Amino acid sequence: MSQKRDKKIPESAEELNDYIHITTPSVWLILLAVSIFVAGLVIWSLTADLATAVPAAAVSKASDVHLYVSADNAAAINAGNPVIIQDSTYSVQSVSDSAVTASVVLNEYERSLIAAKANDPVIECIMEGTLAEGDYNAMIVVAREHPISFLFRSNKR
């Protein structure tokens, strides 16, 4: 049988000095857990780094590595942008000003890496560094942001 305190209105002045039980240790544990979670979320949002990347097909022949991206994505790419290929980081050396038809420079597999059809325009970029000859799936990082910046971003354009 559990004992419950009867909640009643104090009948004398001495009863006003009695201990009033408001919280239990479990309430404090829940409050502590929520506080730790919120603190962790704030620290993560200040220190994490979210990258926005554009898919690219990297074609390595002889000593040059050429990156091909769809013309729609090329506007965000500049010389110096990081390029990630197989957990290694390189950088974009230059970006071509003119587009070429995908079927002229890319085979079917390479076009599938950037989701380009045969007649779609693609832009060529030259990458710094060397790779063994072959085709590679690459990602060109075009922006990096901390998650906290999403809270303070203005949607006005």
Image (cartoon, grey):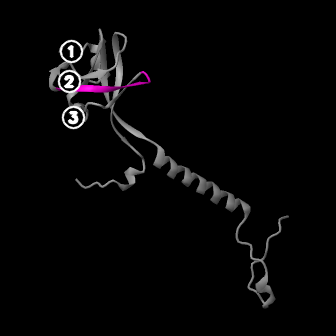
Q: What residue type is labelled 3?
A: Ala
Determine which residue is flagged by label 2: 122
Question: Is residue 90 one of those drawn in magenta?
Answer: yes
Residue 8 position, x and y percent, is 75, 82
Disc 3/disc 2 C-alpha distance (Å): 11 Å
On the question of residue 42 being in view, the answer is: yes
Determine which residue is flagged by label 1: 105
* Viewer-side residue, 62 vs 146: 62
Marks 1 and 2 close (CB-CB < 8 Å): yes
Q: Residues within 10 Å of mark 1 (few under 14, many from 20)?
A: some
Q: What residue type is labelled 1?
A: Val
Q: Give the range drawn in magenta.
A: 86-96
Disc 3/disc 1 C-alpha distance (Å): 20 Å
User: With respect to residue 125, does 143 lie above or below?
Assistant: below
* Viewer-side residue, 115 vs 35: 35
Image mark count: 3
User: With respect to residue 46, does 58 lie above or below?
Assistant: above
Give the position of the N terminus as an image quadrant: bottom right
On the question of residue 109 being in view, the answer is: no
* Lower position in the chain sequence, tag 1 or tag 2: 1
* Viewer-side residue, 142 vs 57: 142
Q: Which residue is drawn at 38% across and 50% down?
A: 150
Residue 49 position, x and y percent, is 43, 41
Which of the labelled discs sits on residue 75, or is there none? 3
User: With respect to residue 60, does 79 lie above or below?
Assistant: below
Q: What element carries label 3?
A: loop
Which of the labelled discs sits on residue 22, or is there none? none
